[in-house]
Image: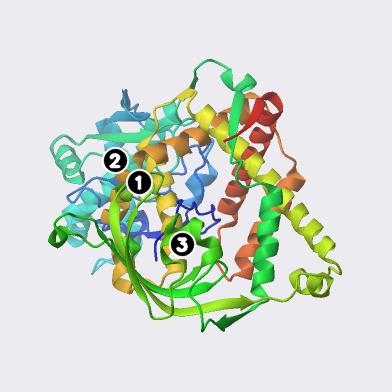
Amino acid sequence: MALCSSAATPAFLKFKAAYTLLYPTHSSFSSLVSLPRNFLLLPIRTTAIFSTTCIKHLSINNSPPPARKFVTSAFTSEAEAADATLEKLPADLKVTETQEPNSRVRLSVEVPPEVCEDCHNRIIQEFMKRAKVPGFRPGHNVPESILVNYIGKQNIQKAIIESILKRTLPHAMSSIAGKALDDSLRIVTKFSEMEKTYSSSNSLRYDVVVDVAPELKWIPEGGYKNLKIVVQIDSEITAQIASEEELKRRHKSLGALKIVTERGLQLGDVAILDISATTFEEDKSAAKKIPSAESKGFQFDTEDADKILPGFLESIVGMQREESRTFPYVFPETWAQEDLRGVRANFTVECKELFYRDLPELNDSIANKLLPGCKTLDEVKESLLQKCLEVEQTAKEQAADNAILDRISKMIEVDIPRSLFEEQGRQLYGAQLLQLQANSKLSEKQLAYLSSPKAVNEFLETNKENIHHIIKQNLAVGDIFKRENLQFSTDELVKEVQNSISEFKKHNQEYDEDRVKEQVQEVLEGAKVLEWLREHAEIEYKTQ
């Protein structure tokens, strides 16, 4: 039965998800082709910097559908080792930089013939070393015309273009090397267009788009330094009330359910009910079923009645076993399901079974059963109260943190890069999918659909506002950490990384230690920022 008077919010979960990115390739030169890769999906690192000679995966928009991306070669380990220096080219490139929306930069690159010719010569030499041309010993000079005929003119041309991209991209990116975000680089010029340009002019032109670290603007400047926060606290449930409810729950769990035989349902009983409901209409034939209110074999604890459906108990008091009743009901205006608020309905309830609880006397004799280690009822009450006070304090602190994060996210203006939006959105979707899979066994067909690009994209669009809100919180926290020169100790980092890795090993899960370290760094940074903001904020708690 889906009846519940308030919507529950699931706790945030730590999670690890592995994704495989498959890129079709078109290269005939195997050393220039990137392979599919797996990576851990972890919280975004807004400080990630693009290294000019560590381009791990470059995508070329070659042909429809748009979602398919071709990959040019990854740089070799030797090139990565020479990260600090750029290979000198025979001639200078012409690079035009254009700012685009969403913190994206377009680079239009013109490669002169001198550079193209040099790449041509290198590729020919490389093929001469590797190709086994009939009639020639491996590694010996082969006339270029024979080599081209053997390898194929088109294959050689593709390899030359890839070589040009590999050598020129670090130079083209040098002006934004300190700002570009990891894995956001995309070559938007079609490969066929580059082939055409190269064939006709022995030069090359291509466009690259890349996301850069967004610039934050605080309104007002430095406004986060003296926040005034009002935190609304629910006054209905205090630690005292919660501890009393917990004691009652534990006491009830020690009792036995016995069948009621000679009376009807009363407060304190437990009933097994079949419930159905329809909308109330003057024309009964127009009445519609209310699926969320239907349930078979629903265990109804009369002491929790108002938590399930306010006013429902009054209509079924006195019901006997196997009795059926139909009665009108109006859903409260505060009902969680919006389309049922204020709706007039007719409920039909059949009592299948009726039980009462045979409870032991609530005294010191059952103290250890109520809470292991306790000898008296007073000890049980005190221990439960202390636990509830701790939970209450944690809840207050969490509410304050949420209010602070909400406030600072609204104090910044930022043009969010698309790559950050997609990464954060996929993380949220991945977390929900993992939780759904844990809570219910999905079929392979269901899982395949929920993992499809279509389902992910629908989620991104539907939850766009929430994703933007989370990203703004993350960016604001990262900016404050840098502005205020906050730090955490190396010991803290090492300890938390070890704890996280231990959890992965405990559950036999794969992990990437560098990604785990990045995640832990973000958690520690966030904790330091929230601690600093709480110390400098004026926080007022108000009960609702």
Which quarter of the picture shows residue 506? Answer: bottom right
Front-most of 276 and 188?
276
The residue at 49%/30% (across/down) is 409
Q: Name the residue under label 3.
A: 313
Residue 240 lies, in percent from the top left, at 71, 50
Q: In this view, does 516 lie above or below 377?
A: above
Q: Name the residue under label 1.
A: 58
Counting residues from the start of the chain, the first of labels 2 and 1 encountered is 1
| Separation (CA) of disc 3 from disc 1 | 64 Å
Counting residues from the start of the chain, the first of labels 3 and 1 encountered is 1
Q: In this view, does 21 lie above or below 72?
A: below
Residue 177 lies, in percent from the top left, at 46, 31
Which residue ends up furthest to the front in the rendered image? Answer: 262
Residue type beneath disc 2: Ile
Q: In this view, does 125 lie to the left or right of 195?
A: right
Which residue ends up furthest to the right in the rendered image? Answer: 375
The mark tally for this picture is 3
Residue 35 lies, in percent from the top left, at 37, 59
Number of residues whose C-alpha sits closer than 10 Å to that of mark 2, classed few (under 14), some (14–19) or many (20 or more): many
Residue 187, numbered circle = 2
Residue type beneath disc 1: Leu
